[in-house]
Amino acid sequence: MAEPSNRLAIAEQMIAHYNAQDADAYVALMTDDACEAGYRGAVVREGKEGTRVGLKAMFAEFPENRAEILKGYELGEFVALHERVFRSATAEPFEVMSIYSFEGDKVSRVEFVR
């Protein structure tokens, strides 16, 4: 099991992979049955493969997409990141809170509050 101090670094590494538009490296940090979902809501990307496919489609649609971490918090098996997301140089950025649930040193779920 990962030390609690490593979980924030893992979530930050996922954002670095996201910003590099490297879906393969991003999902390598997830459990096989991981998912991404709205906060307490519907799953939008199911499983490691569903997340990979969904991210690649989003990166194709928004080639300038990137996220900036404004603040990160860690508590036990959870990490919360306050992010500012830029879809393109001309689009208005938006803020999101992403909540990462961990199983050991792998992310099992990411939920987005927007």
Image (cartoon, helix red, strand yellow):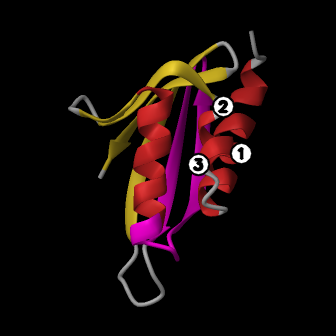
Q: Please, what is the three-letter code of the amino acid marked with disc 3?
A: Ala
Q: List x then y, in percent, for residue 34.
A: 47, 24
- Give the dominant element type of the magenta stretch: helix, strand or loop: strand
- Of pointers 2 and 1, the one earlier in the residue sequence: 1
Q: Please, what is the three-letter code of the amino acid marked with disc 1?
A: Gln
Mark toward the viewer: 2 or 1: 2
Mark toward the viewer: 3 or 2: 3
Label 3, secondary structure: give it. Answer: helix
- The part of the chain drawn in magenta is 60-86
Q: Residue at x 42, y 73 (%)?
A: 87
How far apart, in angstroms, are the residues tagged by discs 3 and 2?
Answer: 10 Å
- Of pointers 3 and 2, the one earlier in the residue sequence: 3
Q: Please, what is the three-letter code of the amino acid marked with disc 2?
A: Leu
Q: List x then y, in percent, for residue 25.
A: 68, 43
How far apart, in angstroms, are the residues tagged by discs 2 and 1?
Answer: 9 Å
Residue at the spot of label 2: 29
- Between 66 and 82, the one lying in front of the other is 66
Mark 2 and mark 1 residues within 8 Å of each other at the beta carbon: yes
Give above or below for 37 relative to 107.
Answer: below
Q: List x then y, in percent, for residue 40.
A: 25, 28
Residue at the spot of label 3: 23
Q: Quadrant of the N terminus?
A: top right
**Label 1 Cα neighbours within 10 Å, binned few <14 / some 14-19 / many ≥20:** some
Give above or below for 113 relative to 103.
Answer: below
- Between 79 and 16, the one lying in front of the other is 16
Mark 3 and mark 1 residues within 8 Å of each other at the beta carbon: no
Give above or below for 1 relative to 3.
Answer: above
Whether 67 is among the magenta residues is yes
Label 1, secondary structure: give it. Answer: helix
Q: Quadrant of residue 41?
A: top left
Mark 3 and mark 2 residues within 8 Å of each other at the beta carbon: no
Residue at the spot of label 1: 13
